[in-house]
Image (cartoon, coloured by chain):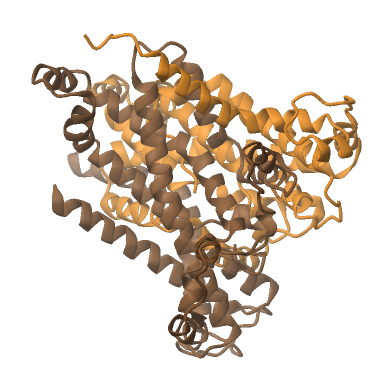
């Protein structure tokens, strides 16, 4: 057998092996993205094929409807963006800190029962978002377990999933600060600056706690793996140099966790911009649209309102946000190392 | 020196945290055995005032829940078997077969992995509709049969197996598929177990794909059914014991897989990640 015929045989086998997987990925991933890109610049109304001759090209109209003009669509998109920005701002740092904290606590080899503790912290990650949301709706209802516990320390808890007040607004209101005119007069994406500063609503705050509860265990595993790779040598060197526990963690361990930190932050950013299952199961965007997210809005706009072009446009804006943030973060973390 | 005994306060802290993480599930199970007034009046109590299995009887004795469960089992089994086969086949080719176009295939794979799932909601519906598999079992299963991350895991594992294991079989004139199927695949057991766990967990817990791929009640699976139950789309009222029992039942299969595979999961860094 000559070398070239082996090559040829290998090329045939190679393509044979990858083609089922690649065909499925192309049909259900690549092609759909291109098709949706077309829908986002078309006036397709959900009837017949989007490629039929009576569907017209409308350019950036669908994008413009969402991003400008003061329409209801724009206000909904602005509200969804505001909600999701707060979700990201709270969830990403909290889940990363919780995961790292848990990993450091259960990492020690001399710890008794560390298998049990790891299992306890990881278990919420295994269950479905739907099942956990059902549980959360019960725990956070107005007379639920969370408010009962808050009652022990004299706090009158809110009706979490029914409370649309923003937590920053509530805190400011408690010290007597009300909306100043210059904040209510200016608008971005159709909603006033004062509304942008509302903070997550109590309903969204319950979802934020849900996210930290379900993801910290997964990310804990990544940090444990990284801590195991670092090994004890570094710690011991630090001890010889007389560094205390906190100094060793801050100056030795943490810098070595940078690659894992990058992974956790990236996955966190990508995940938090996609929150959908919990909203679908729990609140459908309510109360007063304070748990509306771009992902859910995209679904709702297309499937419920039959405005497919705008729904697809929201999906692509979301895609762009995720790509830009991931690249930005990659760049920011590269600079310092 | 590093084997220093952990301080008592560390244990206290860990026990407190473990209570925070475990308590919700204990409350869930306890509440599913309560009556509705009891669940509303004593939201934290772990002991039902009157123990009742009414919620479970209603779910399992009805028609909808067993149907949802069956649909979830069928879809999950098909998806898991499909992923193990297609992911390992493609992973093997990308790791071991030197063929023209391999670099391109790999580049496409990495690019596809970067597309967020939620962005695909509308596009997927459009394609499923065009292919006329909307509201059909194939529509639920086929789009999930391959996942790029799984191919990636298999490729990495195959690269870690020394080339020499295939040489003897190749000299004996075995075909590429035979090399893959009888020689290399049996050695890939740890990676295959990982794919099985991830696929099972992923497709059992999947929601958004099933929302856009069908609206026929006959094709409703557990996540979609329980989500509709939770958001009162089926006109159920509060009925917390019923909803929590449904959520508990849907958690049992993944919990079992988790407990069986626990050692592997706890020692791996390639865990499933959800948002």
Q: Residue at x 44, y 40 (%)?
A: B150
Quadrant of the rendering where the N terminus of chain B is positioned: top left
Residue A163 shows in the view: yes
> Where does residue A62 sit, x and y in percent of width and height?
51, 84
In the displayed structure, A40 sits above or below B150; it is below
Q: Colour of chain B?
A: orange
Along the viewing direction, whichever of A201 and A55 lies nearer the viewer? A201
In the displayed structure, A235 sits above or below B144; it is above
> Where does residue B75 sit, x and y in percent of width and height?
67, 42
Left or right side of A92 for B62: right
Q: Colour of chain A?
A: brown
Outermost residue toward the front in this view: A176
Q: Residue at x 68, y 27 (%)?
A: B26
Q: Residue at x 52, y 22 (%)?
A: B261
Left or right side of B87 for A6: left
Residue B97 shows in the view: no
Q: Residue at x 18, y 52 (%)?
A: A334
Q: How many marks?
A: 0
Left or right side of B176 for A140: right
Residue A233 position by quadrant: top left
In the displayed structure, A81 sits above or below A121; it is below
Along the viewing direction, whichever of A328 and B177 lies nearer the viewer? A328
Along the viewing direction, whichever of A325 and A28 lies nearer the viewer? A325
> Where does residue A135 sit, x and y in percent of width and height?
69, 41
> Where does residue A232 sit, x and y in percent of width and height?
21, 18
């Amino acid at each position: 057998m000559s070398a070239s015929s082996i090559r040829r045989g290998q090329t045939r086998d190679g393509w044979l092996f990858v083609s089922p997987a690649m065909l499925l990925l192309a049909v259900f991933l690549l092609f759909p993205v291109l098709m949706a890109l077309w829908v986002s610049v078309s006036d397709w109304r959900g009837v017949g094929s989007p490629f039929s001759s009576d569907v017209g090209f409308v350019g950036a109209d669908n994008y413009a409807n969402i991003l400008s003009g003061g329409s209801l669509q724009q206000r909904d998109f602005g509200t969804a963006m505001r909600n999701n920005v707060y979700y990201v701002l709270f969830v990403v740092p909290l889940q990363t800190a919780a995961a790292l904290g848990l990993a450091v606590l259960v990492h020690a080899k001399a710890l008794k029962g560390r298998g049990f503790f790891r299992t306890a912290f990881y278990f919420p990650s295994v269950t479905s978002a739907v099942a956990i949301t059902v549980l959360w709706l019960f725990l956070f209802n107005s007379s639920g377990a969370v408010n009962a516990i808050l009652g022990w320390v004299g706090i009158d808890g809110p009706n979490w999933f029914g409370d649309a007040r923003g937590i920053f607004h509530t805190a400011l209101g408690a010290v007597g600060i009300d909306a100043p005119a210059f904040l209510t007069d200016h608008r971005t994406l159709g909603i006033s600056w004062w509304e942008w500063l509302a903070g997550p609503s109590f309903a969204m705050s319950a979802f934020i706690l849900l996210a930290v509860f379900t993801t910290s265990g997964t990310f804990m595993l990544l940090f444990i793996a990284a801590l195991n790779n670092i090994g004890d040598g570094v710690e011991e060197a630090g001890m010889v140099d007389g560094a205390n526990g906190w100094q060793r963690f801050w100056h030795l361990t943490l810098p070595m966790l940078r690659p894992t930190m990058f992974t956790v932050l990236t996955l966190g950013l990508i995940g938090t911009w996609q929150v959908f299952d919990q909203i679908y199961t729990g609140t459908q965007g309510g109360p007063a649209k304070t748990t509306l997210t771009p992902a859910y809005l995209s679904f709702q706009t297309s499937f419920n309102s039959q405005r497919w072009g705008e729904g697809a446009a929201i999906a692509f804006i979301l895609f762009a946000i995720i790509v830009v943030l991931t690249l930005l973060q990659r760049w920011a973390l590269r600079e310092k190392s | 020196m590093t084997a220093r005994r952990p301080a008592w306060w560390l244990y206290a802290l860990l026990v407190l945290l473990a209570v925070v993480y475990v308590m919700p599930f204990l409350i869930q199970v306890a509440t599913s055995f309560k009556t509705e007034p009891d669940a509303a009046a004593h939201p934290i109590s772990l002991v039902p005032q009157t123990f009742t299995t009414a919620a479970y009887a209603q779910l399992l004795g009805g028609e909808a829940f067993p149907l949802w469960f069956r649909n979830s089992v069928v879809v999950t089994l098909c998806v898991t078997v499909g992923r193990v086969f297609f992911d390992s086949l493609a992973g093997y080719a990308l790791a071991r077969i030197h063929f023209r176009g391999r670099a391109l295939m790999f580049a496409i794979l990495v690019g596809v992995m970067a597309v967020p799932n939620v962005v695909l909601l509308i596009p997927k519906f459009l394609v499923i509709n065009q292919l006329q598999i909307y509201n059909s079992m194939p529509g639920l299963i086929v789009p999930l049969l391959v996942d790029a991350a799984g191919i990636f895991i298999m490729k990495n594992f195959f690269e870690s197996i020394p080339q020499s294991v295939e040489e003897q079989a190749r000299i004996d004139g075995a075909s590429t598929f035979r090399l893959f199927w009888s020689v290399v695949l049996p050695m890939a057991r740890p990676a295959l177990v990982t794919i099985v766990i991830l696929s099972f967990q992923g497709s059992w817990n999947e929601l958004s794909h099933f929302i856009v791929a069908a609206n026929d009640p006959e094709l409703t699976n557990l996540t979609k059914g329980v989500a509709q139950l939770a958001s009162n789309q089926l006109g159920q009222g509060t009925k917390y014991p019923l909803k929590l029992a449904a959520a508990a039942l849907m958690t049992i299969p993944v919990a079992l897989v988790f407990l069986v595979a626990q050692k592997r999961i706890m020692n791996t860094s390639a865990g499933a990640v959800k948002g």
